[in-house]
Image: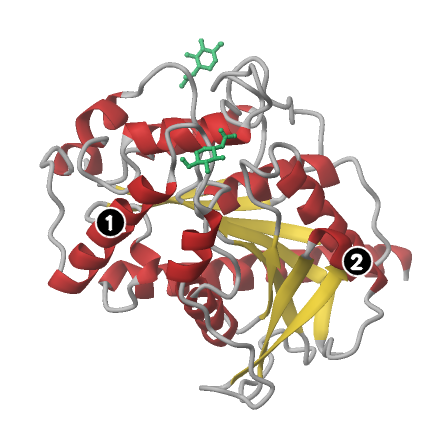
Amino acid sequence: MSREKSTASQPVLPWKPKIVLSLLSVLTDILQRPNGTINRRLHDFVDLKAKARDKPVNGVRTSDLTVDATRNLWFRLYIPTDTTPTGGDGTLPVIVYFHGGGFAFFSPNSIFYHDVCHRFARKIPAVVISVNYRLSPEHRFPSPYEDGFDTLKFLDEAKFPNFPAYADLSKCFLAGDSAGANLAHHLACRIGKTEFRNVRVIGQISVQPFFGGEERTASEIRLGKGQMVAIPRTDWVWRAFVPEGENRDHEAVNVTGPRGVDIRGMKYPETMVVVGGFDPLQDRQREFCEWLRRSGKEVKLIEYPNAVHAFYFFPELPEASLLMEAARDFVLMVSDEVRVEGDQIKNLIG
Ligand SMILES: *[C@@H]1O[C@H](CO)[C@@H](O)[C@H](O)[C@H]1NC(C)=O
Ligand SMILES: *[C@@H]1O[C@H](CO)[C@@H](O)[C@H](O)[C@H]1NC(C)=O
């Protein structure tokens, strides 16, 4: 079993990811001040950015679009330019992506996330929308969730330039990694109670979702030292995110606990969850899958025994390619299920 394989405490990593991850850990420790604030000026300085480019780069055109300037809510749009749409009907699915970073770090134009979304756009292929939600501690729960929801509402209007006609909003996927996957889950819960006109969320790609709780899990105790998502760092970002006076059993964090949203009677998109064997968060991610199953939802668990948290930052790692293939298969499978369902309904009516 994969769980036994990952009892070694050190993953096998090439030198570049090893160095970059150590560097990110050191930077996180510098940016997270003991008084609960973030050195935002230094964050913005060290967070290297990639520009949007209207001229296709490696088969993908990018542009930035504003949703609400008053709270700096915008997204980066990725449009594949030299792929044949996979839908058979000449359309492409739409992936609404939420970047990770403990709700406190990064943005869609951070080089890591620009590259990740570029790869999703090209490899699936799909039109990708990467959302610049507000960060904590300046903007705590539920600000990022609100931003995610308002971006979906904005897409539902679909009245902005640059949105390609072949992007099919009735084949929408929520996606995210780490804190972004936490955001996607909460958004999935919320839209279960919402009717959109054009947007139909049919699937969710949850990559190493960031969940927590007061209790420490076995994997956190075993692996939560000397890694980027070490316990002191995750405790810090949760404190910065939950409302003042709350703890990690808050509904945003301990989603499978008694305060989490009960999704049993709700619509909830079919989900794939990606788990890494060297991620301290893995026990909670498996529990999340089991909880989805117990709640009667469709979920596919994908395990990469040698993967660390944030492995997808490094395209040279085999798991980064496997993730793109798995996401592609998942998007095709779910889109096909929805098409068959649609045909059946048409036949019934017609
Ligand atoms: C936190 O510490 C930083 C740097 O030491 C300081 O500039 C800032 O004003 C402090 N903020 C609060 C809310 O205490
Ligand atoms: C979630 O919350 C419940 C109730 O507060 C608690 O018993 C449980 O240990 C928590 N789970 C985790 C993983 O912290």
Q: Residue type at mark 1: give it.
A: Ala
Label located before the other in sequence (2 or 1)? 2
Question: Percent from the top left, x then y, of residue 177?
Answer: 45, 49
Left or right: 74 in relation to 293: right
Q: Which SS class for mark 2? A: helix
Q: Are marks 2 and 1 in contact (CB under 8 Å)?
A: no
Residue 308 appears in the rendering: no
Residue at 23% over, 63% down: 317
Closest to the observer, 307 or 68: 68
Of tags 2 and 1, the one toward the viewer is 2
Left or right: 132 in relation to 240: right
Q: Residue type at mark 2: give it.
A: Phe
Residue at 71% over, 36% down: 190
Left or right: 19 in relation to 45: left
Closest to the observer, 212 or 65: 65
How far apart in space, not on screen, are marks 2 and 1 (Cα)? 35 Å
Determine which quarter of the picture holds residue 173: bottom right
The residue that disc 1 covers is 307
Question: Percent from the top left, x then y, of residue 101?
Answer: 43, 46
The residue that disc 2 covers is 154
| Up/down of 233 relative to 344, above or below | above
Q: Name the disc covering residue 163, or none.
A: none
Numbered marks: total: 2
Disc 1 residue crowd, few under 14, some 14–19, many 20+, Cα 10 Å: many
| Up/down of 168 relative to 60, above or below | above
Residue at disc 2, CB closer than 8 Å to ligand 1: no
Residue at 66% over, 33% down: 142
Quarter of the image where the C terminus is located? bottom right
Question: Percent from the top left, x then y, of residue 308?
Answer: 25, 47
Determine which quarter of the picture holds residue 116: bottom left
Question: Percent from the top left, x then y, of residue 337?
Answer: 62, 56
